[in-house]
Image (cartoon, rainbow, N blue to C red):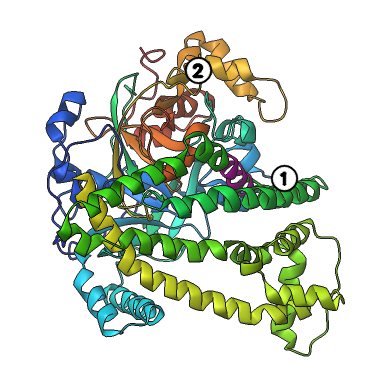
Amino acid sequence: MNKHSRFPSWLPVGAALTVAVAFAPFAVRADEGQWLPEQLKGLDFAALKERGLELSAEEIWDGKEGLLSAAVNLNGCSASFVSENGLVVTNHHCGFSAINRVSTVDQNYLAEGFVAAGYEEEIPAPGMSVSYVTGYDDVTDAIHDVAEAAGDDPAERHRAVQRKRRQLERESKSEFSEARVVPYFDGRIWRRIHRVVLRDVRLVYAPPRMVGEYGGDTDNWMWPRHTGDFAFFRAYVSPEGAPAAYSEDNVPYLPPRHLEVSEEGATEGSFVMIMGYPGRTQRYLSSTAVAVRQEFFYPARLELYSTMIAGLEEEAAQSEEDELRLASTIKSLSNVEKNARGMIFGLDRNQVVVKKEHEEAEFQAWVDADSSRQKKYGNVLARLIELDESEAARMGKDFVLDNMRRSRTLSQARKMMNEEGADGPGLLLVDDPVRTVLFRIAGELSEEGRLMPFDLWMEEGNGDLVALMRLLQPEYGEQRMFRDRQAGLRQEIGALWIEAQEGWRGQQFYPDANSTLRLSTASVKAYSPRDGVLHTPLTTVRGMLAKHTGEGEFDAPAEIFKAVSDDPSALDIPICFLADGDTTGGNSGSPVVDGKGRLVGLNFDRVFENVAGDFGWNSARSRNISVDIRYALWLMREVWPAPRLLKEMGVAARRTGGGDG
């Protein structure tokens, strides 16, 4: 196939952004910050250039396009275009479910890897999509106007805002683009983000699972790391250039921007930038909100997910078909389970609640010291804590309600209730460890937060789960009303809280991550996880082979041993590197670029000590982990060759040197 197409020049994009809140210049505080494209001009570019940045703010993003245009969202992960023919690189774990889905026991691309020799061999990946930003509109006034017109009821204000969001999104949809309307700072600012969404995505290259997931759950969220967490896909469009579902007639998409791949890589001290779509951080919560997450939410999640994983692993052990069928689910749940462990550890070790309590006391003293501040912000902290206390009071109840779908028997009971109606047949108790965990939590709820229909059902003692689902229906309705009201109140209180915080701290803030395009600056850097231990920032093939046991999560493929035997200098090829970038979930697959904007790696994880970084950045512990692009190139040259892709990316067919210098 050699047909190509790009979108027409008249592709509608968002107007250059008119910023509702002035973003004044501000100094870079180390490398904390997940910055919006429109905030980049406010960064201290003189300081960044001293560290190695060679690009201007306009070259990174000029309001409509720039280097950031090459960063794409791929099913909730980040990725990037790396050729003019729509080639996309992301993490292996981001493509894991797609690779899993197209694999069979007889042709197991997940276990064995996959290399497409030509366009015609690239495999459709149903359900995957690639999107990238083409511009922004400020819709803050439009959203605030409908909220004000909705009156004093917070729930109705929230619902009015949601209706307006959907309207603004519908108005922007065309054959070639669509839009998302998103809030920043709890609704203080609203943006309509215009984007192109490509829905014909095909698998192009993936290393074997024992490379893409080397170290498995043991190494997940840990350092040192030796995981080749990368995979390639390609975006296709119709012959006319429009986004389209899969068709044999579709052609590779020619993106407006793609990244140059660097073979120089990054070394300790190198300046880098991480571009992508971080999912969610919670940096501006009150001490009350953090405390209930530390004391209840994450421990409950850990117990629930551990139980789910144990059951699925037992089921997966029954046959090769079951193992393959459940691989993606187990991997996803295991990641969340270990994240919960890291949150519990990090929130405690970093004393986040105590630090926030001290900050809140200092903030209130600042407010009380000035009459004008008292008038404007006098009760904002008390109102915020009151809001958080009301959520904390029912968090246990909501946890049970939200997770009942994860129990097979409770999900089946709810389905039977919906199909049969109020008088349908019952479903009696059978063994279900997940349900057992939820029932225990429900039974231990405090008096003020009890799930009364559950208590009533327990008293009746007939064990009919469908009857339980019927009793719980009003609770789900009440939960929706409560959450609508909270969201409406938070639009008002949260926005004022951020404004007050900016005044107190004397600086502009980056908004919490919300799956929108961001940029973080960083340096490749070592770290010390505990007293007496210092981790260097790069790992190598030598270190990977030293971990090899020949079984389980540390079974390095024979092909790698052969390649090293043929060329011993390959032992020094870097596999992963650490940086102090500000990242979170959703940054998986984010392109890591050098000061010239060239791709040097792919972010894929954080260190265990940084899992709780979602609640606050820490210069000593905030480290992100990236796979070094030089490792990917070596595998594509010498181990599982892909000369077509190397040529397409404009890199040499042979390695020009050994190691990282």
Q: Nearer the viewer, residue 265 or 465?
A: 465
Of 402 and 253, the residue lying toward us: 402
User: Is residue 117 in view?
Assistant: no
The residue nearer to you, when weighing 656 against 578, is: 578
Residue 154 is situated, as x and y percent measured from the top left of the image, at: 37, 78
In the image, what residue type sits under mark 2? Asp
Q: Mark 2 points at which residue?
A: 531
- Residue 407: x and y, percent? 72, 63
Q: Residue 586 carries which label?
A: none
Secondary structure of the residue carrying tag 2 is loop
Q: What element carries label 1?
A: loop
Q: On the rendered image, what quadrant is the C terminus found in?
A: top left
The stretch of residues the image draws in magenta is 333-341
Relative image position of residue 338 (x, y in whole percent): 60, 41
Asked if marks 1 and 2 touch (Cβ < 8 Å), the reply is no
Q: Is 508 in front, or is 66?
A: 508
Q: Is the magenta stretch mostly helix, strand or loop?
A: helix
Taking the image as shown, residue 621 lies to the left or right of residue 114, namely left
Q: In this view, does 430 lie above or below 465?
A: above
Q: How far apart are marks 1 and 2 (CA)?
A: 49 Å
For disc 1, the marked residue is: 106
